[in-house]
Image (cartoon, rainbow, N blue to C red):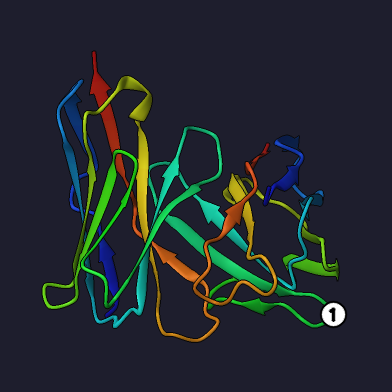
Amino acid sequence: SQKIEQNSEALNIQEGKTATLTCNYTNYSPAYLQWYRQDPGRGPVFLLLIRENEKEKRKERLKVTFDTTLKQSLFHVTASQPADSATYLCALAADSGNTPLVFGKGTRLSVIA
Amino acid sequence: GAVVSQHPSRVICKSGTSVKIECRSLDFQATTMFWYRQFPKQSLMLMATSNEGSKATYEQGVEKDKFLINHASLTLSTLTVTSAHPEDSSFYICSARIDGQGQNSPLHFGNGTRLTVT
């Protein structure tokens, strides 16, 4: 069956350190993968998109990698700050058509001052 | 830009009544909108894809007669939970893709509606 797994439900990290979140998928062949941030009681906000032919994408202190062999994406928050505390969701489409996104359960990141 | 407005943000209703949730794209057109439901500490679960001018496409296990979707214009989709029951209590979130940006483009989400059925 198809699965998207974010293997940590919660991650606590000291301010200033780099947080690394993992997203693994099974029985998908996505052309791209997206990462979103969700704050409590709010809708998700888009952060980054990475395509299957891209190894790495950066946006300010965020970095995403995509390994189609391992079927894995890593999401890094460098020089983390308490304001980075949120739930981070990975999402992918089942195929390259106009299909809706399927989301992982998310990892709740807490950055401790 | 790319703001999606969802109303109401919270609603409490009695069992057996119906509740309508509105989702508007404020500064872009969206032929396609998506409705998700989220339970605490769970993933966003897609309920249906809403298409302007045509019938919605429902995911397996979602009752179309219970969750009525109307996509009346390029900026408005509504979800009506009919004959609500306590088990329908959840966080409902709509999202939209900007027309013309392609199928890989990101989704823009509303801030969700917390529905509590008593």
**Furthest-left residue in this view:** A70
Depth check: give the residue in front, B73 or B85: B73
10 Å crowding of disc 1: few (<14), some (14-19), many (20+): few
Q: Is residue A33 left or right of residue A45?
A: left
Seen as rendered, the residue at the extreme right is B72
Question: Disc 1 is attached to a residue of which chain?
Answer: B
Amino acid type, residue under disc 1 in the picture: Gly
Identify which residue, A70 or A58, lies in the foreground.
A58
Quadrant hosting residue B56:
bottom right
Q: Residue at x 61, y 50 (%)?
A: B92
| Residue B80 appears anywhere in the view | no
| Element under disc 1 | loop
Q: Position of residue B57 (x, y in %)?
A: 65, 80
Residue B25: x and y in percent read 76, 55
- Left or right side of A78 for B4: right
Query: Is residue A15 shown to the viewer in this render?
Result: yes
Pinpoint residue B100: horizontal percent, then vertical percent: 67, 75
State the residue in front, A85 or B34. A85
* Numbered disc total: 1
- Which residue is found at the position 58% from the left and 66% from the top? B47
